Image (cartoon, rainbow, N blue to C red):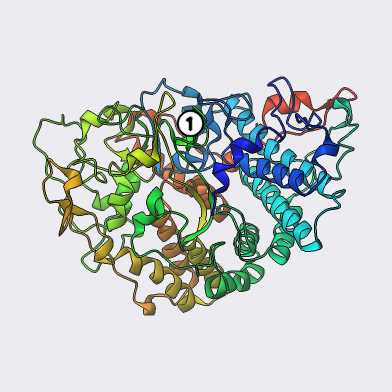
Amino acid sequence: MKSISHIVLGAAILTIAAAGCSKGFLERAPQSSLQEEALTNKKGVNTLLIGAYGALDGQDFNDGNMTDLAGGSGYGVSPDNWIYGSVAGGDAHKGSDPGDVAAALQIVTFQANASNSFFNDKWRVNFEGIRRCNFTLHVLANVQDMTPDERKQVAGEARFLRAHYYSDLKKMFDKVPWADENAADYKNLHVDDFKIPNDKDVWPMIEADFKFAMDNLSEAKGEIGRANKWAAAAYLAKTYLYQKKYAEAAPILENVINNGVTGKGLHFDLMENFHDNFDAFTENNKEAVFSIQYSANDGSGGTGNANQGQMLNYPYNGPFSCCGFYQPSQDLVNSFRTSATGLPYLDDYNDHGVVSDLGKSSDQPFTPDEGFLDPRLDWTVGRRGIPFLDWGLHPGRDWIRNQNSAGPYSALKNVYMQVNQDKYYDGNGWAPGNAINYVLIRFADVLLMAAECQANLGNYAKAGEYINRVRTRAGNPAGFVKTYIDPEDPMGGTTGTPAANYRVSPYPLSMFTGKDFTMKAIRFERKLELAMEGHRFFDLVRWGIAQTELNKYFRFEVQIASDITGGNFAPRNNYYPIPQRQIDLSVKNGKSVLTQNTGY
């Protein structure tokens, strides 16, 4: 089966072209190199649908440089939301030097205003995806050479993708305008006629799109990367969860857990090895509910299909060409400390800190922490003296650009393996690209969302079972990071000896007797399991605890790294500001149609 990422480039000939920076997010008619009539057939509409998938990574596939579909920075619109979801959520520091990409540092310390260009780029890239979905649906309405089922499949995928783009906008900006394929006459659209206010809640429309997709999409898909009915079901349940509609979400999640399959027909389950979710060789596996497909060395001459959004996020120096961003926080690392019983310290984890090499040069002696640790730590965080995949022992400061600014750790989940870098590393750009997919929803996330629903419905033991299913996988010794046979030859294999003192255990089910403890355990498990995957900030906001948790994080973490000095979370920061550029472009009859979020 062909991966969708491998055919996006060819589809670019026909698909909708991105507009220049002078245009607003929906201020232009879709353009293509062929007339609409030439696309109004089965082949044409499927080509347009591929273009809608092609916008998932937000990158310009015609450009070997790091450029997004809005004309800005590729890393600023990365679909994993590493800036907006993980760094802003306390998983990590921006990294590099403080002045490098200062606009991102303003965002993660909550000092950014509506004129920050990153917000405008993120807004426009998502609406470019929406525009492609709408045009696909617009053309589909007049196609005559498709069966009813074929039409349902295209409509289901287009509406799934539209709901995805809108859900990303909704959780970031809250007040977003809704535009579907019926919003305007696409053929005769005039710039000044398309002004849509952001005065309605778009969750109901997002629900309707995901529900349509769930009800109409098939299970099996002929190409890897296409959404099936179970991916739509998981997304619909997540949409309900964000609105605290636990009774609606719970049965859908139960159905996904018990009956769901991937597009390849694999029944959903956890992979035995945690790291298999972050290795291009083992991706599109039974844990991948829906993924953005990346490819390396695809013949385009650039890295546009090779995870450009993470191009900055490799250890500095060493075998990688760029760039020392995205450094895990000490707060996150301390969260992986476990007790003698293998359980986390839910309330006082920072009182049980993990030893680091902060302040030490790489030629000074250092002994890694010898206490009990959750093994997921060393598949998530690069730390000194511990195997960094198959690249050798992390040397500490020699791979860190500025320890004082951003701490002593390196990102790991986004890094390719040395053993197969000839296939999965892409060096055609000025910074590394790779073929590691970004999994938007994986099965562990589904289990923890189901646990959250059950906790809020009073089924605490059932919630505990789902949490423990995730923890049991983490505690499987077969998935521990192991020491090298020869540290000087890291690709020469590993021993059976764990690289650290790993101990993680399931909770006794007798502990799950009330909502407070059960939710505390769920929140902490999401922090561990989904660390550095772009979820943390949005989780904190929807739980209503962002102000408490993030200001506590700032107070602790500023003792470790200086780049977050002045960081402070206020109630307005639950949502990012509507981009000022878009407000300015929305003027109709002398008045802006778009309104700003409260407090900006």
| Residue in the foreground of this view, choosing between 185 and 507 | 185
Left or right of residue 292, residue 586 in this image: right
Q: Is residue 70 above or below residue 539?
A: above
Q: If the image is split into quadrants, where does the N terminus sit? A: bottom right
* On-image quarter of the C terminus: top right
The amino acid marked with disc number 1 is Thr
Q: Is residue 379 left or right of residue 170?
A: left
Nearer the observer, 564 or 216: 216
In this figure, what is the number of numbered marks?
Answer: 1
Q: Position of residue 386 (x, y in %)?
A: 20, 46
User: Percent from the top left, x then y, of residue 40?
Assistant: 83, 43
Viewer-nearest residue: 522 or 83: 83
The picture places residue 311, in percent across and down from the top left corner, at 43, 32
User: In terms of image quadrants, where is residue 22?
Assistant: top right
Q: Residues within 10 Å of mark 1 (few under 14, many from 20)?
A: many
Residue 526 visible from this viewpoint: yes
Q: Is residue 386 visible?
A: no
State the residue at coordinates (28%, 67%). Answer: 476
Assign a secondary structure to mark 1: loop
Q: Residue at x 62, y 36 (%)?
A: 10
Q: Which residue is mark 1?
A: 303
Asked if 279 appears above or below 313 in the picture, the reply is below
How far across and down, in percent of the image, does residue 531 sit? Answer: 41, 50
The residue furthest left is 365
Q: Nearer the viewer, residue 345 or 358?
A: 358
Q: Is residue 4 left or right of residue 357?
A: right
